[in-house]
Image (spheres, rainbow, N blue to C red):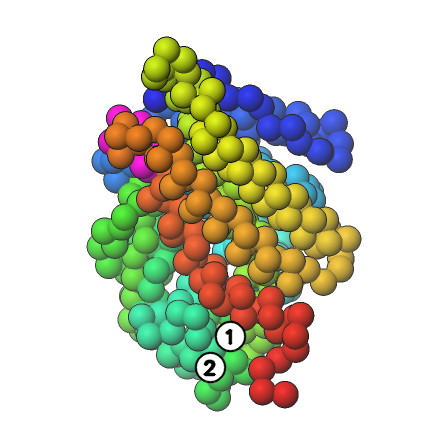
Amino acid sequence: MSDRDPQPVERQLPTEEARDLLALVREIAQREIAPGAAAEEDAGRFPREVFTLLSESGLLGLPYDAEYGGGDQPYEVYLQVLEELAAARLTVGLGVSVHTLACHALAGFGSKEQQVERLPAMLGGGLLGAYCLSEPSSGSDAASLRTKAVRDGDGWVIDGTKAWITHGGVADFYTVLARTGEDGPRGITAFLVPGDTPGLSAAPPEKKMGMKGSPTAQVHLDGVRVPDERRIGEEGQGFTIALAALDSGRLGIAACAVGVAQAALDEAVGYATQRRQFGRPIADFQGLRFMIADMATRIEAGRALYLAAARLRDAGRPFAKQAAMAKLHCTDTAMQVTTDAVQILGGYGYTADFPAERYMREAKVLQIVEGTNQIQRMVIARHVAGPEGR
């Protein structure tokens, strides 16, 4: 790993409070997250104590109302926090994004009574959430999910299997989308299920290419009983709730992707300025300089794109198209930049002695989660050219 300190990112932040917040996040990232990231990822260790620290520091509920324990921060600021965390360790940055996604249903669609009773613990009480939409047979086609919730007295019984669940088996609560009515999107309802509910269990974590410290597992619901007060929104409103969350979640993935790409660029520049061949640093050779220039430009463009989408969201304007564009561009950028970083480091980039190979492995999953990049292209085209089959 290079011993050159990376140049700090020049950020546009709306308030002095936001600048102080980013300074706190960088301090935590550099002191508590980055130093052990490589070893812990290699060991497949989930850093629960880091999430506890982030909760205690007020960083797990940033975009939500202070009335319920949130940070009252705009998405413009929250996403830049995610970027800093992901640059230090993607398991942490993406984990915060998933937790935020898991809180979205209750924060956006729950009743006042539900929010008062449950949100403070979720946003700042040390709890960690998971989001259960995908299933073994319904990934991109989420509206075809088969997990069922059947009324039983004054509650519900949920049966089914969810797949690819980040924090599966370690989460304290699960936002679960289940079928309560007809086939298709109108028959889906959202539930908030405690992690210790009888009948809820997790399979062993998937063995993944990267992000080995972040557990991804199937979650089984076998006769899981929840009271009706755990239903979020109206019956049949679940798919609308899920889509609203995913637009925001895609921005979280975009910010995490920029963080990984920035970390890879910093590593590549640090190596290239220190590694000497033919009597001078390899950073002096035009081929590498042009590669670095392209990497930096892609990252800046990605950061600008996700921030533009965030500002639309903060202003209460439609942002679904821009969220899909940001997710698409930023994750493709992360894949390209991390691949280039490995190339710049040469043989060293292919070894685990340097973090470039880890960044490259981690970048790949970002093109898949929260809707594959092929799905993002479909969403963008629908906004630009209209729906298919007109």
- The reply to whether the C-beta atoms of the residues labelled 1 and 2 are less than 8 Å apart is yes
Q: Residue at x 22, y 55 (%)?
A: 204
Give coordinates of residue 168: x percent, y percent.
34, 54
Q: What amino acid does circle 2 point to?
A: Thr
Above or below: residue 368 compared with residue 18: below
Q: Which residues are magenta?
A: 351-358
Q: Can you say which quadrant of the picture contains the C terminus?
A: bottom right
The quarter of the picture where residue 232 lies is bottom right
How would you rate the neighbour count of disc 1 (Cα within 10 Å): few for under 14, some for 14-19, many for 20 or more?
A: many
Q: Residue at x 75, y 35 (%)?
A: 14
Above or below: residue 65 compared with residue 39: below
Nearer-the-camera pick, 320 or 239: 320
Above or below: residue 52 compared with residue 149: above
Instruction: Identify the element where label 1 is drawn.
Output: strand
**Residue on which the image places disc 2:** 180
Q: What amino acid does circle 1 point to?
A: Thr
Give coordinates of residue 94: x percent, y percent.
45, 45
The quarter of the picture where residue 155 lies is bottom left
Q: Main secondary structure of the magenta part?
A: loop
Instruction: Identify the element where label 2 is drawn.
Output: loop
The quarter of the picture where residue 283 lies is top left
**Residue on which the image places disc 1:** 189
